[in-house]
Image (spheres, rainbow, N blue to C red):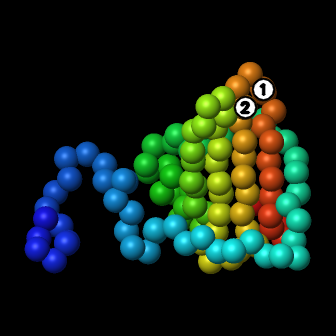
Amino acid sequence: MLPDGTAQGRFREYADYMAMRSRRPVHLPDPADVQPRESTTPVDPRLIAGAPPGARLAIAALTGLRLDPRTEPGRFLTWVSRTTRAREKALVVREEGKTEHTLYELSDRPV
């Protein structure tokens, strides 16, 4: 660590905990004129959110989407968003014991 707050050198493992400035989350406000669509999906969001760093990088590079997972008691939440468009985001909720997971999409097209 240098006096100006920057760091240099090699990382022993992955450094995915340190987001580059361009990859830090930007939370755009929800558009007031759009209501979320609710549906279900059989895809467990933990499968995608828990993918290896290289796979998550490929997903972000190919789709432009960002994943923000969070674990809460009894459920797992994953937000999927495009940081440049407020109209393209989704929330997948996995609840313990269920095989279908709730999907809320706030977008003009399927996220």
Residue that extends furthest to the front in the rendered view of this protein: 73
Q: Residue at x 72, y 42 (%)?
A: 93
Answer left or right for 45 relative to 41: left
Q: Amino acid under label 2?
A: Glu
Mark number for residue 9? none
Q: Return the residue at label 2.
A: 95
Q: Few, some or many C-alpha atoms within 10 Å of disc 1 (few <14, some 14-19, many ≥20)?
A: few
For the point 79% across and 76% down, the residue is: 31
Query: What kind of element bears circle 2?
Result: strand
Q: Residue 108 at x, y = what percent? A: 84, 71
Which is more toward the observer, 51 or 106? 106
Figure quadrant of residue 44: top right
Mark 2, residues whose alpha carbon is within 10 Å: few (<14), some, or many (≥20)? Answer: some
Disc number at residue 98?
1
Q: Is residue 110 visible?
A: no
Spatial distance from mark 1 to mark 2, Cα to Cα?
Answer: 6 Å
* Amino acid, disc 1: Lys
Q: Is residue 2 left or right of residue 89?
A: left
State the residue lying farthest toward the top. Answer: 97
- Could you say where residue 43 lies in the image, as x and y percent from the top left? 73, 38
Residue 38 in view: yes
Residue found 20% across the figure and 72% down from its top = 6
Q: Are marks 1 and 2 in contact (CB under 8 Å)?
A: yes
- At x 72%, y 63%, the residue is 89
**Residue 14 % position (x, y):** 31, 49
Residue closest to the eye, 25 or 110: 25
Quadrant location, the C terminus: bottom right
Q: Is residue 47 above or below residue 30?
A: above
